[in-house]
């Protein structure tokens, strides 16, 4: 079989790249020249709202205030958090209380602030004030964004840049504000400094002037890249992968320097000359906040390059670091080496996002409903197969989402469930549905751990009344098991047949693999005792000679991951010898990380045959190599695994 324009089967996972990149971080010297700001987070207590006696206008009581470096300050803070050997801040501050706080914040992080020039009134330290009520951000209050820079101070500021560049491996030029020392005149002088310090790498991250700098590495997003190339694209317009790559190549050809182009949740592209690095986006389960992600990207790139790292390491680390940052809400995020190590070198990458979101682009094996995502030319038959259970083989638990959703909503709102405003209720319902969708397939305990975060975040339940993950799981299991027991009882009474709760053709497919000598394993996020009992009732437990594995009440033990690692290590397998079959993203991601062949089953659990488009999207993003609606076209699936079953 050969289809046109199908990418190869292999997905590159190099476990050593992260440590290699981290070794560069504490070796370099980086200066940040730009718009140093302060971010202020004011957390308002709505319970204490009142009207002013004098004006009769609402009074908002701030229960907590937090301050952190913003703009170029957050870039410097990220460099410090990454452990860069020397970080220097170059620019200006206001001679005001916010300027003093900004200096204090930077200095406390070990950042050299000696090159920050204090300016007198009317110059104000730029401040972004972000008021929050619960998880909702109110209208921002900005200060100093439209300062008029005193021309007589420009030479002094540029002299500090010149001196800093002579003591740096990398200089970041970070322009954020319209009221700044960055303008046509100053950029001409900065370009002369870039040419003079030819041994220093300059990196530009500029909202308005990126195209004016010469001889510098560019960090831009897709819309900024389009604008620099003379094409205005609306901000709400999605720019395709192919267009993004073309933009990056054109910019790099024009500047003769590397270009790093960020794609939001779809990852990052870096190019230099003929070299092109494409790093996929990374799946996130919880709430996200993109504030500061760009700062993390440019800081990570600078940190790696300053320490002697290469373009590939810089791109990969920046992408991973930004994903950690956007997972931090109500704060201007930074990333530490510890957090990077915890995330690991093989995160949950998002594959083929454009294809996943566009069923019209599907490419099928001729004469079948089997969608081919990657071309997997097989030289050896599959020897081992790991199956997920619920939704992949069995639909005994079909409808579990409808049980989990109201349980989670009630856990978040508690006694307020009937009295909370309609718009608030609708927002929580939407949030819960999105969370369930993202976490489908992981251990129930892990889902309940995420629920605890949602409960705390919304703040309707007093801390002392919040259950642990085991308590919430018990609530959910009680309702779920009642449904399952009813279905199992009907099977035992002969009122229904096991086939009535089976994905179309699943048992025949298992039997065919078993006949061909494939050792079968069952791995589920459901409790192990329950999985074993359900497989017995369904009549196929004996086929799983590799064992039936489920959750054991320990978040640290992920059944699917453990089984995959055990099989691969004990059998010394190559990717071709192992197939992972599932209807959820977790098992396919784990298989992808180990270069296994990933068979996604986009099953419709109500009809038990036919395609579920929502599942298709999830499975492709998780790394499926092929997607099938069910097993009814087994005669086409088996050859893809190296078999031609005649029976």
Image (cartoon, rainbow, N blue to C red):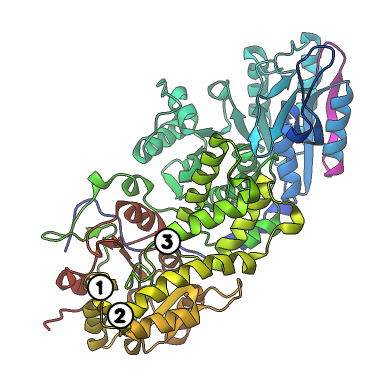
Q: CA distance from mark 1 to mark 2?
A: 9 Å
Report whether 387 appears left or right of 428: left
Report whether 396 appears left or right of 135: left
Q: Position of residue 585 (x, y in %)?
A: 42, 61
Q: What is the secondary structure assignment of the residue under circle 1?
A: helix
Name the residue: 62% across, 61% down: 449
In the image, residue 456 above or below residue 102: below
The picture quadrant where one finds residue 615 is bottom left
Q: Position of residue 544 (x, y in %)?
A: 36, 86
Total number of numbered labels? 3
Find disc 3 in the rendering and name its residue. Answer: 585
Find disc 2 in the rendering and name its residue. Answer: 491
Magenta range is 108-124
- Which numbered tag is attached to residue 500? 1
Upstream in the sequence, badge 2 or badge 3?
A: 2
Name the residue: 73% across, 27% down: 129
Report whether 374 appears left or right of 527: left
Asked if one can make out residue 443 in the rendered structure from this viewpoint, the answer is no
Q: CA distance from mark 2 to mark 3?
A: 30 Å
- In this view, the mark in front (2 or 3): 2
- Which numbered tag is attached to residue 300? none
Q: What is the secondary structure assignment of the residue under circle 3?
A: helix
Q: Please report contact status of discs 1 and 2: CB closer than 8 Å, yes or no.
A: yes
State the residue in front, 525 or 411: 411
Residue 260 within the magenta-colored segment of the rendering: no
Name the residue: 75% across, 54% down: 463
Q: What is the secondary structure assignment of the residue under circle 2?
A: helix
Asked if one can make out residue 288 in the rendered structure from this viewpoint, the answer is yes
The picture quadrant where one finds residue 464 is bottom right
- In this view, the mark in front (3 or 1): 1
């Amino acid at each position: 079989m050969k289809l046109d324009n199908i990418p190869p089967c292999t997905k590159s996972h190099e476990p050593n790249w992260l440590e290699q990149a981290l070794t560069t971080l504490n070796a370099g010297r980086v200066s940040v020249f730009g718009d140093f700001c302060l971010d202020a987070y004011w957390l308002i207590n709505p319970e204490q709202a009142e009207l002013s006696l004098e004006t009769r206008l609402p009074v908002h009581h701030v229960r907590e205030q937090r301050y952190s470096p913003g703009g170029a300050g957050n870039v410097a803070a990220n460099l410090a958090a990454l452990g860069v050997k020397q970080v220097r801040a170059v620019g200006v501050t206001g001679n005001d209380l916010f300027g003093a706080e900004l200096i204090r914040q930077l200095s406390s992080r070990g950042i050299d602030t000696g090159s920050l020039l204090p300016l007198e009134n009317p110059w104000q330290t730029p401040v972004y004030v972000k008021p929050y009520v619960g998880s909702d951000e109110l209208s921002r209050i900005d200060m100093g964004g439209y300062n008029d820079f005193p021309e007589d101070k420009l030479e002094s500021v540029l002299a500090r840049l010149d001196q800093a560049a002579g003591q740096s491996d990398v200089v970041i030029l970070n322009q954020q504000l319209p009221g700044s020392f960055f303008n046509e005149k100053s950029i001409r002088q900065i370009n002369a400094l870039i040419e003079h310090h030819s041994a220093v790498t300059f990196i530009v991250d500029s909202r308005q002037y990126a195209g004016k700098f010469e001889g510098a590495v560019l960090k831009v997003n897709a819309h900024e890249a389009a604008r620099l190339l003379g094409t205005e694209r609306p901000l709400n317009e999605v720019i395709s992968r192919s267009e993004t790559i073309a933009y990056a190549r054109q910019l790099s050809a024009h500047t003769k320097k590397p270009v790093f182009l960020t794609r939001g949740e779809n990852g990052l592209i870096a190019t230099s000359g003929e070299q092109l690095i494409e790093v996929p986006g990374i799946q996130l389960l919880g709430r996200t906040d993109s504030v500061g992600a760009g700062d993390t990207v440019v800081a990570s790139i600078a940190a790696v390059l300053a320490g002697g790292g290469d373009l590939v390491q810089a791109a990969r680390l920046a992408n991973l670091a930004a994903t950690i940052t956007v997972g931090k809400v109500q704060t201007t995020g930074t990333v530490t080496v510890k957090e990077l190590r915890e995330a690991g070198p093989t995160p949950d990458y998002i594959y083929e996002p454009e294809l996943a979101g566009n069923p019209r682009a599907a490419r099928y094996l001729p004469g079948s409903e089997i969608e081919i995502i990657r071309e997997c030319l097989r030289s050896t038959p599959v020897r081992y197969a790991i199956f997920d259970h619920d939704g992949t083989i069995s639909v005994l638990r079909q409808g579990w989402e409808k049980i989990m959703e109201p349980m989670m909503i009630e856990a978040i709102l508690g006694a307020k469930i009937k009295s909370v405003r309609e718009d608030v209720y609708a927002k929580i319902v939407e949030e819960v549905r999105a969370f369930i969708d993202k976490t489908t397939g992981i251990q129930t305990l892990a889902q309940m751990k995420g629920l605890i975060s949602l409960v705390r975040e919304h703040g309707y339940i007093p801390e002392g009344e919040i259950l642990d993950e085991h308590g919430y799981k018990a609530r959910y299991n009680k309702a779920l098991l009642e449904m399952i027991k009813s279905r199992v009882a009907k099977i035992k009474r002969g009122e229904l047949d096991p086939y009535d709760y089976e994905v179309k053709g699943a048992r025949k497919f298992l039997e065919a693999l078993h006949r061909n000598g494939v050792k079968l394993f069952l791995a589920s996020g459901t409790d192990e005792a329950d999985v074993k009992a359900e497989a017995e009732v369904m009549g196929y437990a004996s086929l799983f000679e590799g064992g039936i594995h489920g959750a054991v009440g320990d978040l640290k033990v992920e059944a699917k991951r453990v089984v995959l690692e055990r099989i691969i290590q004990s059998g010394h397998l190559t990717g071709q010898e192992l197939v992972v079959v599932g209807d959820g993203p977790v098992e396919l991601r784990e298989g992808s990380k180990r270069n296994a062949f990933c068979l996604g089953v986009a099953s419709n659990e109500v009809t038990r045959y036919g395609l579920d488009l929502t599942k298709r999207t999830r499975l492709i993003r998780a790394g499926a190599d092929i997607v099938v609606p069910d097993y009814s076209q087994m005669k086409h699936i088996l050859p893809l695994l190296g078999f031609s079953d005649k029976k």
